[in-house]
Amino acid sequence: MRAFPNPGALLSLLVLGAQLFACQQTPAHADSGSQGEPNASALAPDPAAAPAANGEVAQGEPSESSSAPGQGPAAEAPANAPAAEVDTPPTAVEPSAELPEPVIPGATAGNIQPDDALAADFRTMRPDPQPDEIIRNSHYWVSNEYSHFLFRDTIANVGGAYMGVGTDQNYLLAGWARSELIIMLDFDGEIARAHDLYGIAFREATTPDEFLSIWRDDGEKRFADLVPTYYPDDGERQRLLLRAFEWGGTTIFARLRRIIRQYGDNGIPTFMTSQEEYDYLRNLWLTNRVFAIRGDLTGSLAIQDAAHMLRRHNIPMRVLYTSNAEQYFTFTPEFRRNMLVLPFDEQSWVVRTRPIEAWGLAPDDDYHYNVQGGLNFQLWMRGSSVSDCQRLMRNRSQTGVTGLSRLQAPLPEDATTPPVADAQWPEDVAQP
C-alpha cells in the first residue's frame, strides 16, 4: 500500500501557494464545427478526434446540500461565448483479459517511442454527441482545484494509460503517473481545442519557460502563426482553434503562472517547474500518444472505443480522473458499463474531487479529494445499486491527511445487483 503525504508538510505546501485568481465566466455560444474533429497529436489534421471539458452533462442539480458555495465543475474562464478510519483492502475483480505490467514502468522521455499503429487506432475513437447544454453555460478552460498534489503519492509512476476531464490538471497528474498514453475526455468541444493548443505549444517549446512564453500576451500572434502550420489544409479548424485561444488563452496563461508560483519552491516537480517533467509530457505529444475527444462519462461511444483500443494494445488503464463530474449525474446503466469496460488492474486508481465542506476540504481549497482503487470501483459498479457518487463516498475512510480520503470498502452484505447497459464488445467487460 502506498504511503500518503505527511499532513504537516502538505499544510505548509498549501500555505505557500497563493490563492488562484478568480476565473472569469461568460455565457457560452453554440459549439460549431466540433463534431468528429481531429486532435492535435498529429502534425497534420486527421479525420478522427474531438473535444473535451470539465464536468459532464448535468442530469439534474448536484444532490449534496453541503457543497461549498459558488463552486462549479472545474475552473471557468473567459469566452466571448462559452467559458466555460482504517483502510479496508479492496476486493479484487479480475479484468476480462490478462494485462501486462506497465509497458514502461518508471518511464522517462527517452524510452517512449512512436507507435504508428497505436496512434492510428486511437484516432478512430468516436466522439459522443454534442450535449444540448454545458454546465453553467460555461467553458472550464482551467481547473479551480488547487491541491492535486494530494493524489501524487498514490498515482506516482503507475504507468499505463491516463484518462481525465479538464485541462491543465491532467498534465500535472499524467506527468506524476508517468502515463504512457493520455486520453483527454470531456463533453465540451472547446476544451478539446484547448488541448490541441497545448499540443502545439508542447511541440514548439523545448523548455517550460518557452512553453509559458507562447501563452503570454502576444500568444494570439504566436498561435496565429503556428496553427496554420499544424493544420495547413483546414481553414475551419484554424478558425476554431484561434477562437479558443481568444476565449481561453489569457486564463490558461494565468493558470500556468499559478502552477509555477505554487509548486516552484515546494519540492514537487511539475511540467511547469521541472525540465524532466516537461520533457516527459512533451515527448508524449511528439510520439503521438495524447488524444483529446469529446466524451461523456455516461455516453455510449468514446469510452467504449477508448477501452477497446487499450485492450487491443495491452495497455492497462491506470489513472481515471473525474474531477467533480460525478456530482452531475447518477450511476446510470451506461455509466456503469463504461466503468466496467475500462481495463483496470491492481495498480489502477480513480481520483475525484467534491466540493463538500462536511467531508473535510483541503486547506485553502474548496474541494475534498478522494482516491479509490480501480478494481474496487468496478466491484461497486457491478455489484451494488448505490445510486450516485455521494452515497458511494459514505464508504470512504480517513487517511490522516486533511482533505484526502480513500475508498476501498467491500460491498455490503445486502448489496443488490444493478442494471448495466450492454457493451459493444462484451468481452471487454470486467468479470467477477
Image: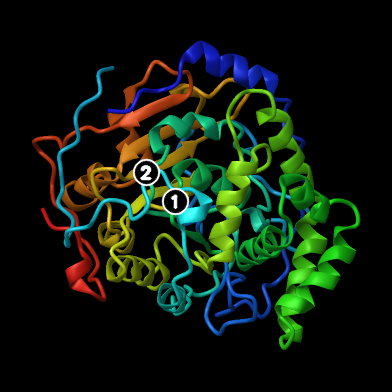
Q: Is residue 271 left or right of residue 300?
A: right
Give the number of the disc on residue 253.
none
The picture quadrant where one finds residue 21 is top right
Q: Position of residue 22 (x, y in %)?
A: 76, 37
Does residue 413 appear anywhere in the picture? yes
Q: Position of residue 350 (x, y in %)?
A: 37, 44
Say above or below: 220 vs 361.
below
Q: Which residue is mark 2?
A: 158
For the residues labelled 1 and 2, the Cα–Cα distance comes to 7 Å
Name the residue rendered at 71%, 80% in the picture: 231
The picture quadrant where one finds residue 263 is top right
Q: Is residue 215 left or right of residue 346?
A: right
Q: Is residue 55 left or right of residue 143?
A: left
Secondary structure type for disc 2: loop
Does residue 25 appear anywhere in the picture? no
Which residue is at the far front? Answer: 110
Secondary structure type for disc 1: loop
Task: Judge by depth and name the residue closer to the eye, 77 or 255.
Answer: 255
The picture quadrant where one finds residue 63 is top left
Q: Position of residue 335 (x, y in %)?
A: 33, 59
Q: Which residue is mark 1?
A: 179
Q: Position of residue 292 (x, y in %)?
A: 54, 66
Q: Residues within 10 Å of mark 1 (few under 14, many from 20)?
A: many
Q: Mark 1 and 2 residues: CB-CB less than 8 Å, in contact?
A: yes
Q: Amino acid at mark 1?
A: Ser
Q: Amino acid at mark 2?
A: Val
Say above or below: 334 vs 101.
below
Name the residue rendered at 13%, 47% in the picture: 416
N-term mark: 1 or 2: 2
How does the figure colour the protein chain or chains? Answer: rainbow
